[in-house]
Amino acid sequence: MDPEIKKDEEAILKEANGLLKDPAKRRLLGNVLTLGGLSLATGITLNHYGSVKEILKAVSRFNDGAQGVIFNPHNLAPTYTEADIKQPFPFNAFYSVDKAPVVDPGSFRLQLSGKIADRRPWDLPALYALPHTEQITRHICVEGWSAIGRWGGVVFSEFLRRVGADTTCKYVGFKCADGYFTSIDMPTALHSQTLLAFTFDGQLLPAKYGFPMKLRMPTKLGYKNPKHIVEIFVTNVYPGGYWEDLGYNWFGGS
Amino acid sequence: MDDDRTSIHPLWLRIIHWANAAAVVILIMSGWRIYNATRFLHLNVPFTHERLFPAKWTLGGWLGGAIQWHFAAIWVLFASAILYAVLFIASRRGKQFLPITPRGLWSDIKAFLKGHLSHADIRQYNTIQKLAYLFAMVDLVVLIASGLVLWKSVQFGWLRVLLGGYEAARYIHFYAMAAIVAFIVVHVVMALLVPKTIKAMLWGR
């Protein structure tokens, strides 16, 4: 990746991590948002610092609903050819590449919980034995870049069907080996291009791209595509997500 | 409605103008913050080595905050664009902007170069004004279309294809932003030079 882009990315991460940890900075962010809002929108002093922030959060939740309405599960993301694949494919996470979690393939078990009939854990050979689909699609990052890659795995709706997931529920949530977590809407979980991916470019997913598995959705932004998944759950209670709780839009998809 | 008949700009137009102006300013400033997350063009602040866009020019505090501002303001932009389009047709405002003839343009350019281009009757737009306002309208449509592709490239697949692909839409969105910024600079300078136009857009006359 462009070193300039890398630098910006680090700045964003530092900024966001700082916001998470430091209450003074969190207040500052509130003030920045509020000051911008009052000077631009009204020119009137707002007494309750943070109220603009609350309004913006509410609009973002409203936008989740609007996007759910716009989302037509029959519309497919474009697919590409081998020649379009970006080499090397960019690494992106909330930590540097050498901090990617190491998962032991022998002892690994995928946990299932929530509204799933058969919650028995899965080992990797059982997952690898599931019907395999390959897909070359564009990964779009919220930070303003995109890259085409090739992922392979089981169609996620097929996996959900096999484990008896209650697909009338609203959300599917994911917990990851690196502490990351996110959740998606059921219509996207059931989209025909949503893969529980075990391979990247024909090889087992390397650690940096999400070993042992990632959920690959060409209809969602990168931060919605969890890597290093260790647990999948189905629920009607809004589970949020790592970046989503900090302010990224929850639906985050196209 | 008596007020509307005698005013230069009807009330609906004035409300849409200022709502649209606020939305566009918020969209530009938050958009600059979003751009800063991956500066895909190598652009500096003119005459400096500072890279675009300095944080103090931007809105949102960080990428996530900027996105929240951006996607709140789009609703105001959508609403104002749709209302304007409907009322533009219903009120036959097209007469103010069309027709534009090459002859009219040429005589206006000559008048402009001699410093004689008239703004005396603010009810009447000269050809250069007509072109500028039509350009702003078309540019906003381009911004909305390219924004829709960046936001919903799968749902608006036909629009993505029309604009030449996902990454093309990013560049179109950026250059259309630059064009609307250029329009705003000229528009504000011209309005300040002829202050009665600002009065008319605020109070109607």
Image: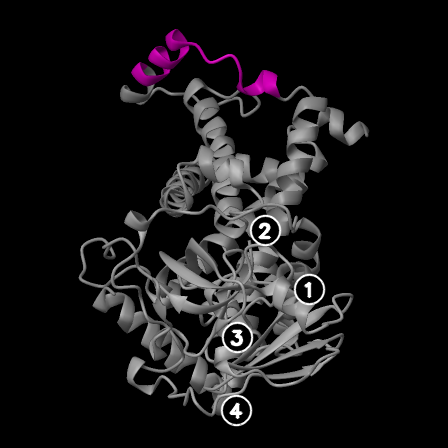
Ranked by sequence position, the earlier of labels 3 and 1 is 3
Q: Are marks 1 and 4 in contact (CB under 8 Å)?
A: no
Percent of width and height locating residue B8: 64, 28
- Are dots 3 and 1 on a single chain? yes
Q: Secondary structure at mark 2?
A: helix
Q: Chain of mark 1?
A: A
Query: Is residue B96 on the magenta stretch?
Result: yes
| Amino acid type shown at disc 1 | Met
Image mark for residue B5? none
Residue topped by disc 2? B74
Callout 4: chain: A
Q: Is residue B99 visible?
A: yes
Disc 3 and disc 4 in contact, CB within 8 angstroms? no
Instruction: Give the residues drawn in magenta, as a range.
Output: B94-110
Please indicate whether residue A222 sits to the left or right of residue A192 in the image.
left
Query: Measuring 39% from the left and 87% from the top, which residue is drawn there?
Result: A101
Observer-nearest residue: A78 or B6?
A78
Q: Residue at x 54, y 35 (%)?
A: B197
Tell me the residue that label 1 is attached to: A186
Determine crowd level at label 2: few under 14, some 14-19, many 20+ residues with C-alpha closer than 10 A.
some
Callout 4: helix, strand or loop?
Answer: helix
Gap in angstroms between the C-alphas marked 3 and 2: 43 Å
In front: mark 3 or mark 4? 3
Comparing labels 1 and 4, the label whose residue is closer to the camera:
1
